[in-house]
Image: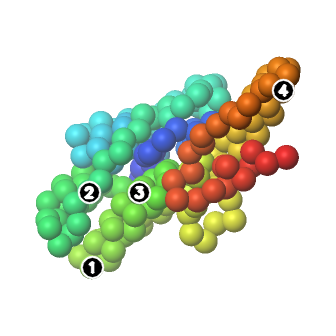
Amino acid sequence: MANCIIAQSGGPTSVINSSVVGLLHANKDLGAFNKVYAGLNGIEGILNGNIIELSSFTDDEINTFRYTPSSGLGSCRYKMKNLEESSEEYDKLLDILKINDIKAFFYVGGNDSMDTIAKLGKYAKKTGIDIKFIGIPKTIDNDLMYTDHTPGFGSAAKFIATTTLETYLDSSVYINNGIFILETMGRDTGWLAASACT
């Protein structure tokens, strides 16, 4: 039976580790893969050979990991070159996956991560390599196509709504409270800003 690998990329959210744990639990139930590996610090870590076996950890350790803040496996903002420029990184990554008998690569992340996984999937198909590349959506911006909402958005929206309310209440104690500006993330979308409305 073959193995799989999972890695995290982009900004951390309060649920990014739950996606990793979800894969581990699903594999335990389904027995689809012999071993579940993890790339430390995303695709950049995998290219540097930083791989651990997640399926060897105890249930208690995995449960602790689930509630650990930030990206428990580390992250990166590494962009692979376009295939038209060079396939060297792609070939190196595929060699690493083949050496570890990996037949599925799961990448947890947002826009750039989904772009990376799409490029890898295209290249694997083009070269006839039997490895599946699967993106697991995660972005507080809530801007991934074909998703109603992305894991990470809900907790970020709650944080923004709470911060807005608390800031309003703090500023409203004064007779002349003026104007305050609260900036939020959201890339090219306004979902988080909209969550501040009450």
**Residue 28 in view, yes or no:** no
Instruction: Determine contact: label 2, label 4, CB under 8 Å.
Output: no
Label drawn at residue 80: 2
- Marks 4/3: CA distance? 40 Å
SS for tag 4? Answer: loop
SS for tag 2? Answer: loop
Instruction: Determine contact: label 1, label 3, CB under 8 Å.
Output: no
SS for tag 1? Answer: helix
Per the image, the residue denoted by label 3 is 112
**Which amino acid type corresponds to the residue marked 4 in the rendered image?**
Ser
**Which amino acid type corresponds to the residue marked 3 in the rendered image?**
Asp
Q: Residue at x 29, y 44 (%)?
A: 44
Per the image, the residue denoted by label 4 is 172
Q: Residues within 10 Å of mark 1 (few under 14, many from 20)?
A: few
Per the image, the residue denoted by label 1 is 126
Q: Nearer the viewer, mark 4 or mark 3?
A: 4
